Amino acid sequence: MTRSTSITFFRPLFFRRNRMAFTSPDPSTCVLDAFRNSIAQRVAAALPPLTVDQVYSGVDYGKKGVDFTIALPRFKLGKPEEVAAKVIAQFQPDELIESATPDKAFLHFQCKTPTLIRDILTQVHSLTHLTPVPCYGSNSTGKGKKVIIEYSSPNIAKSFHVGHLRSTIIGGFLANLYKACGWDVVSMNYLGDWGTQFGLIATGFEKYGSQEELEKDAIKHLFDVYVKVNKDADADPEVKAEAARWFKRMEDGDESALKNWRVWRALSVKKYTEEYERLNIAFDLYTGESMVGREWQDKALARLEEMGLIEDVDGAKIVNLEQYKMGKAVLRKRDGTSIYLTRDIGGAIERYEKYKFDKMIYVVSSQQDLHLSQFFKVLELMEFPWASDLQHVNYGLVQGMSTRKGNVVFLDQIIREAAQVMHEQMQKNEEKYKAVIDPESVSMEIGITGVKIQDMAAKRINNYTFNWERMKSFEGDTGPYLQYAHVRLSSISRKNPHLIPLPPPEQIDTTSLAASSHAREIVFLLGTYPDVVKVALKTQEPSGVVTFAGRRTIDKARAKLWMYECARDVLGAAMRLLSIRPLDRM
Ligand code: ARG
């Protein structure tokens, strides 16, 4: 794989707009908190009646070579020059903070380089290698809280479209993120495994179904049957009526109507589980629309009727949410069968009863904004106090995700195409290719990384056009580049066998690193990772983590090797947070 080996490095620009007004400082998980706290203590002491907490929330990352900055006007203590002068007059350098410099309305602070380097590397090292599981970047702000994250949620027998892929990728990231912040996470796949279409498939299966095909690839076969019977239904209303009757029997719990459906569902879940495993995504629970009990759906309807919000239109029940600018929505069909919206309402209540969650997140495309706001509204109208703990994490559309064979219908088509595109790319460099031990699995891993990174690189809500060229590129913030950076950092240790194993941190002399401004910048960047994680939790956006991982961190001896190992550890941590398996060779 060819790419330039020149290494660039940037300041953590991505923090500028995110004030670090975080929870209380915790140097045991973020050693930069110790430096910020020291700044806050000095400033508070010089500027009564300010408290340390007040100042602390105003200590931001600086720009262009400045470690930390405080914008003085925020304290409303008068002229910035005079306020700054008071702080400067009392300032004494110590082991943590070396200098304070006024600059118009700002006060800049520099950390003492040897302490900074040693403390950050020691923390990365110990929280990566001396803990039961690597946990550098993690924090415990969510301790004792439970979150349900529902994501992916494809429909059995329909296509797995790119919207489902985005939900899978973003949801997988959020599950990692909440875990990293100490939350108890229940990750849930809410399958579209119920509804009239199953009546349709059952009808069609009698004509088009094959047990053999079903066992070979349930997802594909059920989709084929669905497409065929759908055509029949368009031409013949009797097929539709038959399907509706069949679904009604399913809803009424008629075992003979449910038998096949059970098999279809189980086979589909099995196949999906394998594909998610390839994506490095897992669920604690496969639930589905079929599993929502009738009880709460009925209660919800009764309650809304009592409140005068239900209209009866020819026997169908419709909730009127026009006063909330959310239109009208059907809650129950004329034949008494339930629908998507009602199942979501009942399902949320059941989940609360069962899990008593502190928060529940639905990762669903912005195309369903109205649906989610309708069902959140209904729960609010029913006066469930936890209704305000539900959150819709939405995202924009993806265009252009088709393979060379045509439109994407199934998840495994995307995975296969990504692997193939990468494989072809790798084969272009014959010599390197020959050195790769398992090119099939390496290309699949890089291909999947490419798809994920392209998806998470920009703000969720943006639409984007998927681009296979960009996906396979080793230049810029791409998946292959991140893997490449991790591989290079891993290979530095392998290529310097005389330096390893590294002695314990206290025996490594890091003075030589302190002399290099480049090394200082790299280490400072590593120190910011715990904040990257906190910002991501606040915004629920993976893009900041992608940007962070894309900051280049490569370029005597043990101190440098230690730094590189720490750089690899942190890059690896960020990649794992993004649900990517970092490679050590490629
Ligand atoms: N299965 C649905 C679809 O493919 C997505 C489900 C989203 N989650 C929910 N609770 N409504 O459109």
Image (cartoon, rainbow, N blue to C red):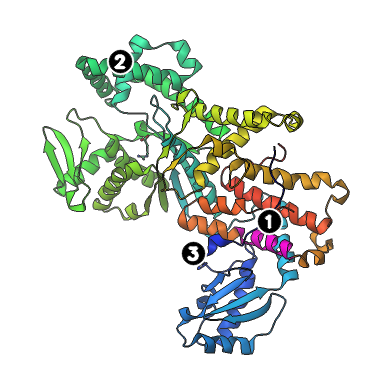
Q: Contact, CB < 8 Å: mark 1 with mark 3?
A: no
Residue 258 picture quarter: top left
* Residue 441 in sight in this render: yes
Mark 2 or mark 3, which is nearer the start of the sequence?
A: 3
| Picture coordinates of residue 135, whole percent (x, y) | 64, 53
At horizontal 63% and vertical 29% (from top left) the residue drawn is 423
Q: Position of residue 113 (x, y in %)?
A: 73, 70
Mark 1 and mark 3: Cα distance apart in space = 28 Å
Residue type, label 2: Thr
- Packing grade of label 2 (10 A; few <14, some 14-19, many >=20) is many
User: Which is in the foreground here, disc 1 or disc 3?
Assistant: 3
Q: Which residue is mark 3?
A: 17
Do residues under tags 3 and 2 come within 8 Å of each other at their CB atoms? no
Dot 1: what SS?
helix
Nearest to the eye among marks 3 and 2: give it. Answer: 3
Disc on the earlier residue, 1 or 2 = 1
Q: Quarter of the image containing the C terminus?
A: top right
Residue 239 is situated, as x and y percent measured from the top left of the image, at 24, 15
| Residue at mark 1 | 127
Residue beneath disc 2: 203
